[in-house]
Image (tube, rainbow, N blue to C red):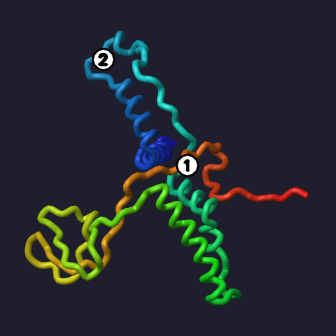
Amino acid sequence: MRFKLALTVFFKILFDQQVAQAIQTVLSDNVMSSSTTDDDLAPRENTQPPVAIRPPRNDALTLLATLQREARFVDIVQEPLDDYSDTQIGAAARDVLRDCGEVIHRLFDLKPVVDKEEGAAVEAPAGYDSSRFRLTGNITGNPPFCGELVHHGWQASHCNLPQWSGGEDSALIVAPVELQVT
């Protein structure tokens, strides 16, 4: 049981900053030195306000739910396309892609990492971050590396995911059932 709990807590700490902060607070309040006395074991007054732990909802699900709600992304991806012509698929995709773009722009405001056109000469400096530059081709020697820009990359200017306020039983719901009552 403790092993399962440890794994669960590990992944919650890894993927949820608020849970990590709450655990850190609990641990720092309960750290005991090796020279513990009876006075040390007495309950201490918590000087930090309690951290509210939100229900277990992954931000990826919140993003997916937002794309579904505002752009019908999941609907078009899950729809069997065999019965539709390329023209019908293209017409449906146009609206979904436009609406997805609006959601992505509002939530992240993506900008190019390198503000140059494809094919332009670009340099990855010495000490470059491999999250910023993916080098391909003939990579020999030491940086800086010069090459032809294949893709300018994307970076978010901000991250404004909507706050999820549902209950634990609906943490994995991406889109609710819709009923039209007659």
| Above or below 84: residue 45 | above
**Residue 110 found in image quarter:** bottom left
| Tag of residue 175 | none
Q: Residue at x 12, y 65 (%)?
A: 126
- Separation (CA) of disc 1 from disc 2: 39 Å
Estimate the x, y position of residue 8 in percent, counting from the top left.
Answer: 48, 46
The tally of labels here is: 2
| Above or below 142: residue 41 | above
Say which of marks 1 and 2 sits in front.
1
Residue 3 visible from this viewpoint:
no
Front position in the image: 150 or 135? 150
| Above or below 33: residue 115 | below
Which structural element holds mark 2? loop
Q: Which residue is mark 2?
A: 36
Estimate the x, y position of residue 114 in percent, counting from the top left.
Answer: 27, 68
Q: Residue at x 43, y 52 (%)?
A: 159
Front position in the image: 92 or 168? 92
**Dot 1 surroundings within 10 Å: few (below 14), some, or many (20 or more)?**
many
Type of amino acid at the residue the image marks with label 2: Thr
The residue lying furthest to the right in this view is 182
**Residue 116 found in image quarter:** bottom left
Upstream in sequence: badge 1 or badge 2:
2
| Tag of residue 57 | 1
